[in-house]
Structure formats: C-alpha cells, structure tokens
Image (cartoon, rainbow, N blue to C red):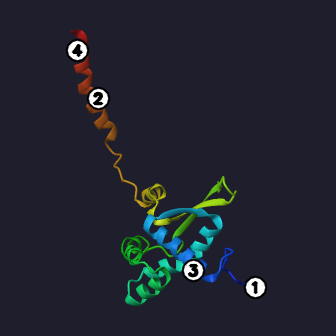
Amino acid sequence: MRHGVKLNRLSRTSAHRKSLMSNLAIELISHKRIQTTLAKAKALRVYIEPLLTRAKTDSTHNRRIIFSYLQDKESIQELFGTISEKIANRPGGYTRIIKLGKRVGDNAEVALIELVDFNEIYGKTAAAEKAPAKKTRRAGGAKKKADEAAPEAPAAEEKAAE
C-alpha cells in the first residue's frame, strides 16, 4: 500500500527516476522552460521547488546539497546566480505548468513547465500593476489647452485667406 506517498514513480526504477529528474531539472534551469509530459512536469515540480528554495541562501552547504541532486556545475552557477536573484522575494511557487494538449504520436498529455519569474509576457503585466500610477494635477489643464488652441486658430485662418 502507498498511504501518503507523494512520489510518482513514472514506471521507472529509482536510479532511472533520479537521473531523469536531475536531467529535467538541469534543462529547466538552463532554458527556463521545457516541454514534457504532464506527469513528468508534475513530478519535476515536486523535485525542483525545494532546490530553488535552498538556492535562495547562498552557502557552501546549500551548494553541496544541490550538487548532490544535479551533478552539473554550470546549472548550479546559473541557479545561485541569476535565478536566486529573481526568486529572492517569492515565498514559493517558483514553477508554472501549462497544459498544451495531447501529443500526436502516443496521445500523451504534453505540458510546458517554466520558471515563473522568467516569463516576459506575464512578468511585464505584473510589474505594470505594481507600479504606482502617475499623479497628475488637474487644475489649470483646461486653460492651457484653450490657450494653446487659440494661437493656432488665427494661423489657420491666415493660410485659408491666402
């Protein structure tokens, strides 16, 4: 029985599953988004979210723990460099899974898993909403427009007279 077991075995041995999750995590860190099956994306989210939480505090201990999971120096540099800066203020939920439909060959559900802070489309709208609105002074605005429009009107009449 599997009471309370949250790990999806993905029909693989433990060594194969660890290698698969490590490779998917390395690709996600380097490319910021990957396309895979829905089951693998959900399993990857469970695998990589604790690693991203650990990467928020840069210490030798955390680097060694994450290296034991990933075994890739370039991805660890990327993780503790650019990614940790962007996710520093986020309390969790570092990844987003978007369902893409069914794959043509085997009818498997395909999904896109991405790092939330590296999506330019959603990131710009969120930043725009957080920015405070410009404060404009309303007083005297109608007078300025009327004064600007008044000198243009005689100039237009002179051109029409010629």
Secondary structure category for the residue under label 4: helix
Q: CA distance from mark 3 to mark 4?
A: 81 Å
- The type of residue carrying mark 2 is Ala
Q: Nearer the observer, disc 1 or disc 2?
A: 1
Q: Which residue is mark 4?
A: 159
Horizontally, residue 3 falls left or right of residue 58, namely right
Secondary structure category for the residue under label 2: helix
**Residue drawn 29% across the image and 29% down it:** 149
Q: How many marks?
A: 4
Q: Alpha-carbon neighbours of circle 4 within 10 Å: few (<14), some, or many (≥20)?
A: few
Horizontally, residue 137 falls left or right of residue 19, namely left
Q: Alpha-carbon neighbours of circle 2 within 10 Å: few (<14), some, or many (≥20)?
A: few
Secondary structure category for the residue under label 3: helix
- The type of residue carrying mark 3 is Lys
Q: Which residue is mark 1?
A: 3
Q: Say which label, 2 or 3, has the lower sequence index.
A: 3
| Residue 149: mark in rendering | 2
Q: Nearer the observer, disc 1 or disc 3?
A: 3
